[in-house]
Image (cartoon, rainbow, N blue to C red):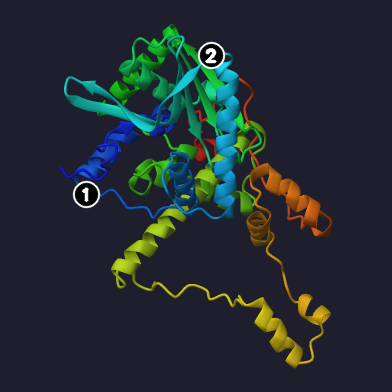
Amino acid sequence: MIVTDHERLDLASASSARRRRCCVGSENLIRELRAHNLLAEIPEDPDAASGNLVHSAWAGQEVTLNGNQTLTLEDLQRLEQMVLVNWAGDESVYLIGREQRLWVHDGFDPVISGQYDVAYGKNSGKSVLMLDGKTLYGEQDPAEYNDQLRELVALFYYNNPQTEKITVGILAPKLRERCTLAYYDRFEMELAYRLMRLNLAEAAQPNAVRTPGNYCTGCPAKLNCEEVRGLVGRTYNLAQRIEQGEYQIPLGEKGAAFLDNIKTVKGILKALEERYKVLLEAEPDAIPGWRLKDGKKVRMITDAEKTLARAKQYWFSDADFWSCVDLSIGRLQERLSEVAKVRGKGLERKFDEAFGKFVTFTQYGPELEKIRKKKGELEDEPTPDPDRLASDSN
């Protein structure tokens, strides 16, 4: 079989731990589709590509970042230093590595892998700090019950069984909770390893069940999964019935489950649409009645100085001209960073000092936001069936 994911050797990884816990049968479908060359290629999300650039820069690689990416990198580095200093205390520490992939083997055969972003050790003992950076917006499980971090602990423990204590942390500069930490002793490391092996054994069973949920959006098999298609169809049918007055809109826990399904379905449909774009680009006649059209063209003027001079030739006053201009706050802040030689929080303070009194805000309509579970409450339980919701609300 041809390997398509050379980094992970087409095997399970810690980054898929959340999906594997909630949808045990997903790994079987991925393997089957990959074996028959049917695993749909999903175009890379621009936000994910931006996050990958920031991670590369954080690891020390030479990459070109824009202003926002640079600020995110600096926030990550600042959070890393804060956590490191607090964890180290008065003890000396050393860098174990950055972006290191760890493996578990059965004999000579690789089984599963995972990559941490950065890890440190204490010179005085067998304690380790592992950090994982999250550069995007969106929901994120705290470190104490984060599936990916638990499996990274298991992988590190397998490769370094002498370790006595591991502290893991999530650094998320874009989120309200910018840093969360969790602590594992030897008993918990062993438990994490056994849970990982148990999950892999259950996922390998031929009759392992697939259960759709909001973790489906990151699954490479989502466009070929019958359970996901069923979720899309059932959610759409229930929405139609509500619109037609057959059922009242679900409230309470049923409403929360329905909103979870809506969010999942929107992500799946977006991925499906992107896949059709790729297909039509390769085979223009593949879908009768549909074609790719050119993207929208947006008129832009990039030379403001020459444009102002030309506008004055057409009887524009300065006030007339500037009333037509929308300033880009992001580019203005980037330029201030260059001329004032400041970055990070210092740049934010300098910008507020220089231009804060001229900044106004446009308030958009309210958006739905899922409230994070209380400490110790797990997310992502199996999604209730929308048909069940409909029958219950009847």
Q: Nearer the viewer, mark 2 or mark 1?
A: 2
Q: Which residue is mark 2?
A: 91
Residue 258 visible in the displayed image: no
Please tell me which residue lies in front, 258 or 39.
39
Residue at the location (79% across, 87% down)? 316
Residue 20 image offset from top left, x and y in percent: 38, 30
Position of the N terminus by quadrant: top left
Q: Amino acid at mark 1?
A: Asn
Looking at the image, the residue that sits furthest to the bottom is 314
Residue 359 image offset from top left, x and y in percent: 79, 58
Looking at the image, the residue that sits furthest to the top is 187
Position of the C terminus by quadrant: top right
User: Which image quadrant for residue 125?
Assistant: top left
**Relative to 360, residue 69 above or below:** above
Spatial CA span between label 2 and label 1: 52 Å
Residue 114 in the figure: left or right of residue 104: right
Residue 237 in the figure: left or right of residue 370: left
Residue at the location (36% across, 16% down)? 157
Residue at the location (62% across, 38% down)? 175
Disc assigned to residue 37: 1
* Label 2 crowd bin: few (<14), some (14–19), many (20+), radius 10 Å: few
Q: Is disc 2 placed on a helix, strand or loop?
A: loop
In the rendered structure, which disc, 2 or 1, sits on the residue that comes first in sequence? 1
Residue 82 visible in the displayed image: yes
Q: Amino acid at mark 2?
A: Glu
Please tell me which residue lies in front, 219 or 24.
219
Residue at the location (31% across, 23% down)? 202
**Relative to 65, residue 24 above or below:** above
Residue 363 image offset from top left, x and y in percent: 77, 55
Residue 130 image offset from top left, x and y in percent: 46, 24
**Relative to 1, residue 271 above or below:** below
User: Which image quadrant for residue 141?
Assistant: top right
